[in-house]
Image: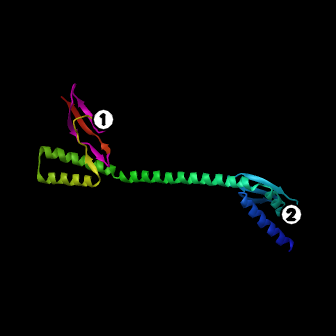
Amino acid sequence: MNNEQQRQLAKEEAVKKGIQRGMALMREDLKMYGMKADGVKVFISESKDYDSLWDDALKKIESIPIEETINKAEEYLNNWKRERADFINYKKEESKRVEEIVKFANEGLIMEIIEVLDKLYVGLKHEPNETMRQLAKDFEKFLANYDVKKIEIGDKFDPGMHEAVEIESGGKKLEEVRSGYMMHDKVIRPARVSIKK
């Protein structure tokens, strides 16, 4: 076996032993380093010439205890598993966030349609006719397709759903001034109410 073949065998053996000990080997001129998984660079050996570099490195690597690297490998594996779980949780949270964005993407358009519907209701109060009534029903059906519902006034004032515009002292009865709406169970416009006796 010639020097080149011996050097190649020593190199392969050193690389294999280094991997068993949890590090990749790096050569800088006539110095040998081990790069650990955590990014720490460890000096292994230095040689006078290239022919003895790998033999020297192999001897030094073999002196590193394997048990220590097995514990480190388990630690790295556990850290990887934790990071993987965190990443999976992040993906789930991001998916929910994107779903919310998509769910409410049409909110601006819906608000404009609600404004038009308000004007239709005012027009129906002053001059009711069948065309305007049908148009209002069509808008209501359109809003229902996007899970938009009118807020029921009820008997009690709810600050999450109602906006008081007039309050009589001692008043308890709610009267609707302007309709409120919810989209996918989120209030997109609170109902304006006056609280009267």
Q: Could you say which is closer to the camera, residue 71 or residue 79?
A: 71
Q: Which residues are magenta?
A: 158-185
Tag on residue 52? 2
- Say whether residue 67 is magenta: no
Circle count = 2
Q: Residue at x 82, y 72 (%)?
A: 5
Q: CA distance from mark 1 to mark 2?
A: 82 Å
Q: How would you rate the neighbour count of disc 2 (Cα within 10 Å): few for under 14, some for 14-19, many for 20 or more?
A: some
Residue found farthest to the bottom: 1
The answer to which quarter of the image holds residue 2 is: bottom right
Q: Secondary structure at mark 2?
A: helix
Q: Indicate whether 175 appears above or below 3.
A: above
Q: Could you say which is closer to the camera, residue 48 or residue 111?
A: 48
Q: Is residue 140 visible?
A: yes
Q: Indicate whether 14 appears above or below 42.
A: below
Question: In the image, is 128 to the left or to the right of 16?
Answer: left
Residue 152 rendering spot, x and y as whole percentages: 23, 42
Tag on residue 159? 1
Q: How would you rate the neighbour count of disc 1 (Cα within 10 Å): few for under 14, some for 14-19, many for 20 or more?
A: few
Residue 41 rendering spot, x and y as whole percentages: 74, 53
